[in-house]
Amino acid sequence: MLAYSAQAGCVGARPCGWAAGNRKAPGTSLLICKRDPTPLYFQGRRHSRSRNVKGLSTAKEAQEEFWAGFVPLARPFAPGHAPRLPVSTHPGGTIVVAVTSDPGQLNPAITTAGPTHVVADNMFNGLIQFDENLNPQPSLAESWGISPDGRAYTFKLARGVRWHDGKPFTAADVKFTFEEVLLKFHARTKAGLENVLAGIDTPDDYTVVFRFREPYAPLLRRLDVVEGPIVPRHIYEGTDILKNPANNRPVGSGPFKFVEYVPGDRVVLGRNDDYFKPGLPHLDRAVFKVIPQPSTAVLALEQGEVDYLWTVPGPDIPRLQANPSVVLAKAPAGPGGSFCIDTLIFNLRRPPFDRLEVRRAFAHAINRRQLLEQVYFNQGRIATGPIASTMTWAYTPDVTRYDYNPDEAVRLLEAAGYRPGPDGKRLRVTFVHASTYARTAEVIRDNLGRVRVEVELVTLEFNAAVERVFVRTDFDLGIASYCNGPDPEIGVTRMYVSFNIKPIPFSNGAAYVNPQVDELFARAATTVEEARRAAIYHEIQRILPGTFPYLWLIETEGYRAFRKDIRDLRIWAGDLLERAWREQTR
Amino acid sequence: MLTWTRESVTPKRTAPARRPPALPIGALGLLGAVALLALGADLVAPGDPLRTVGPALRPPGPNHLLGTDDLGRDLLAMVAHGARTSLLVGAATALVAGAVGILVGGISGYFGGLVDDLLMRLTEFFQVTPRFFLATLAVVLFGPKLWLIVGVVGLTFWPGPARILRSRILALRGREFVLAARALGAPEFYILGRHVLPNALGPVVVTTALQVGWAILTEASLSFLGLGDRSAPSWGQMLSNAQPFIRTAWWLSVFPGLALLATVLGVNLLADWLNRQLDPRLRRADPRL
Amino acid sequence: MGRYLLRRLLQVPPVVVGLLVLNFTLIHLAPGDPLYFLVGEGGDESYYAAMRARLGLDRPLPEQLIRYLAGALTGDLGRSFRYNEPVLALILGRVPATLLLSGTALVGSTLAGVWVGTVAAARPGSFLDRAADALSGVLAAVPGFWLGQLLLIVFAGWLGLFPVQGMVSPRLTGGGWALLVDVAHHLVLPAGTLAFLQLALTFRLTHQSVRETLAEDFIRTARAKGLPPGLILYRHALRNSLLPVVTVIGGHVGTLLAGAAVVEVVFAWPGLGRLLYEAVLTRGYPVVLGIFLVVSVMTVFANLLTDLAYAYLDPRVRYA
């Protein structure tokens, strides 16, 4: 049962090697993998081996795998497959997930807000879903292919999928969702796709074709339930989508159905017995409990009142690690964003940050190790550049380093002409930040105080801070969590290209203009072959830390904590609970 | 259950059981310590209290008497400088409330008539406005600045002193010494200021003293919810920051909490003593204080 | 009495209108575009343009005020983007939870405070008297959130006697008696925290008041008549002592709601205070403004009830 033949490929962490049944696509170095017809999650507890709770060391296994960014011709789900659950699995049970924020409305296609996605992603599906290495796997699309010129993606949709109200799912739902919902209201999808997508065709009820103006590489990673959830056309067509009451009582296709929402308290989801993936979900009920104080949530977890925490406050990590009934696991991705880097934004539009020497001085003056230890409690790493080190295929460590060196900072500032004035300060800058970054801001102010730079802290509420930095551009320093996204094209490009200097939140806030970088990003988006794409991103990473539009502080990778008796949680994805089960039924 | 004896129901003395002490020892002790800390903050902990001075999360020890917080800042320095903030906020708020209250209550009580009616409606209007929510609203709309908090909270506190003063003046203005002064030709404002007010201010002072404590607690609650002014160290903010560490670094919650407790307790004891110094029978003149 | 009631009721509308005007003034005094305060964040350009026209924000200020008043009085307090719901419905949905919490705390603290205060006053100088005095002094000075967290850690954490958070156990299905017991179990710690804070005040007032009353002549007369001490204490002394207590408690309804806000955050109780906290954090202006309004109106009616109770308790009080 647990033996994997070389034929089992392209699903999960198993390498898709040069084995019988796999062949090379002509004219490229792509592999076309032949998928094992029995989906891996039916083969029992393989996860006890590959799911290493101390971290994603199985990423090393995945590195052996040649992954082109999409799976040509994957084998479809055969609805007739009998699910072979391991003997010790008991179907049923309830899980309680603690969330820190009330989700509000529950339509994941009109927002990128984490709180909504944490809950709603369990009620919907995307065309694909991610495995733990963020590689696309079939979901609503059971197979797909790409045209040789890279401009058209064809998806074959799963059959027999029903919405929670019983109506059938067809390609028209996909077309409608993208054209009328995602491209209008979903911030990342709209920003990413609206200029490159030429059109969406539905030649029949179960086929969708995405046509692009240029060859477009990153499409597949934009199609999971976080970036591209599919909503039912028959509910939303012709209505005011933002105010549709279905946003509060959603109808989706996902493993769980909506049962109840008590605002401010909890959302209750029930099992979808007609879920199109046979044998799933295992759980009967999912309750998302709103607990705004993280320390209260930790207490609740220890007492068994809740089963899963999405975030663990730093000071409680050692205690939870010592607790035998609690498991801690890290994942770099989640429903709020993937591969996120807390980034300091320089305002290049005005002095002093229009000068490179000043920016480099600041880079040397800030003690990121102190930040990592004291503010982030080691939940992450010091960032080296625009791409997170956990995005292994695109990352390179071979970049200019800028270590903590206050003397160097002083030297650079003096060389730039900033000497201490009569009040002892060389320079005064304003630092606009949201209240969640208060501790980070205080450390930065302290660090800069030592090199005699005065930082005026302007603490605002989150939306006000975003508005002031991105829309009114009235700041010297800003800070934001820029998430790379599952693919760099989703979250990295927007920060550096000159045509994205717009009054939109999380755009090119620094107002950085570099035609060479613009051109590199454009090429990366249209280069379909992964090795060549990676090389382009490597070059970008070599350029950017030298020119410093931003200061990349910390790659954040938080812990999730959960009770030991719960298995197969997809802690890196929005659809956390699709495969989860409890060791005993409650 | 307790048994009732005749003696317990009818005390032998009609005066309060204990004579008020000549000086409020407890109150002076507590407040004196806090005030000393506030005044001597620069001596005890010179420099910017909000800068990193040592390793993070150290328990109280010889280097840092009260320990350090998660950013390596000395707790003693922050508590000492925080004393200034809290005392200032408390005193300023009570002063604002007292000043406005005395003005309104004095005029309203003394002159009566239409002026009295209008001012009393205004007073009631501010009395029904829930002060915490108004302060929250103001801070959300205008931004977290200390002077704003003082102003808004003070504006909601003034009805108390106003009504107390008014009822006292109403009781006093028919008295003979007032009539006598008027007969002698003294102008009205002079009578109000020189004769009536000094006799009426007693309970107002007591209430104002109590309001110092309430103002400090209100500011702490606002800081707890994230609405405080971050550029000034304040005990409420320290307690808010200490929340995630409440089980791992107890000193972060205990010391600011104790400081807050001591200050407010001292203020309340002082107010109690002031209360007892004044004629206790006056309190029954108008229960609707 | 009837005329008094009528007069007081007639005073309510001007006060409410006054509150609405205060709200309106604050919205327009605050820095930033008043549109966002009325409508909230999250829309796109076309939506804001449409709302601006509909709210008449390009009209002269007095006209805007009339429109705002008209809207508010018909129950349109705006719409919350985050919840996709009208603000008034959202707020009213949370009121029961807060009332349950505050009401329980109020009843509990009043009963306990009055009882202990009376007993302590009847035995001046005893250990109970002095201990209660000292303890109440300390309790009156404790910040609510601190006390709440301490109680949470001790009783829910170390001792595990009570649930940690919320109003209902998340695993509970169904209703009936099980639900009632569950809610009661969850209610103990948060209501207890609130009650402790109010207890101090109630105790001190009752104590002082009863002690004064016991010194009055009519008590001496009653005693001389040979009435049993318990009767004297509870029927005669207490009833006359309750006036200041009632007044001050009624006047502190606003404080009780505010204290509830802080306790609700610590204990994750799904009430109005929590809604306010989240609205503050997410800049949900319509919700913040709406809560202020609703709580103010509730306070006005609470004051009215207090005054009526006052009149009932003291027949000497006459309202012309």
Image (cartoon, helix red, strand yellow):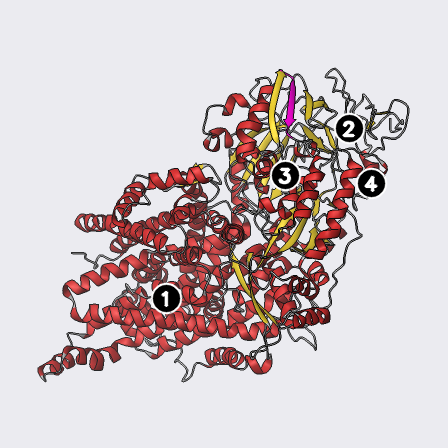
Name which residue lies at 65% across and 22% down: A209
Name the residue beneath numbered marker 1: B154
Q: Chain of mark 2?
A: A
Please rate how many residues cluster around mark 1, counting C-alpha atoms within 10 Å: few if below 14, some from 14 to 19, many from 20: many
Disc 2 element: helix
Q: CA distance from mark 2 to mark 3?
A: 23 Å
Viewer-proximal residue among A262 and B203: A262
Please rate how many residues cluster around mark 3, counting C-alpha atoms within 10 Å: few if below 14, some from 14 to 19, many from 20: many
Query: Which of pointers 2 and 3 indicates the residue nearer the eye?
Result: 2
Viewer-proximal residue among A275 and A153: A153
Left or right position of B109 against B138? left
Q: CA distance from mark 1 to mark 3?
A: 45 Å
Q: Amino acid at mark 3?
A: Val
Q: Amino acid at mark 2?
A: Tyr
Name the residue beneath numbered marker 2: A41
Q: Amino acid at mark 4?
A: Thr
Q: CA distance from mark 4 to mark 3?
A: 28 Å
Q: CA distance from mark 1 to mark 2?
A: 64 Å
Q: Is residue A417 above or below residue A472?
A: below
Q: Is residue A212 magenta?
A: yes
Disc 4 element: loop
Name the residue beneath numbered marker 4: A58
Name the residue beneath numbered marker 3: A96
Disc 3 element: strand
- In the image, the segment drawn in magenta is A204-213
Residues beneath discs 1 and 4 located on the same chain: no
The answer to whether residue C185 shows anywhere in this view is yes
The answer to whether residue A107 shows anywhere in this view is no
Figure quadrant of residue C153: bottom right
Q: Position of residue B48 (x, y in %)?
A: 58, 74
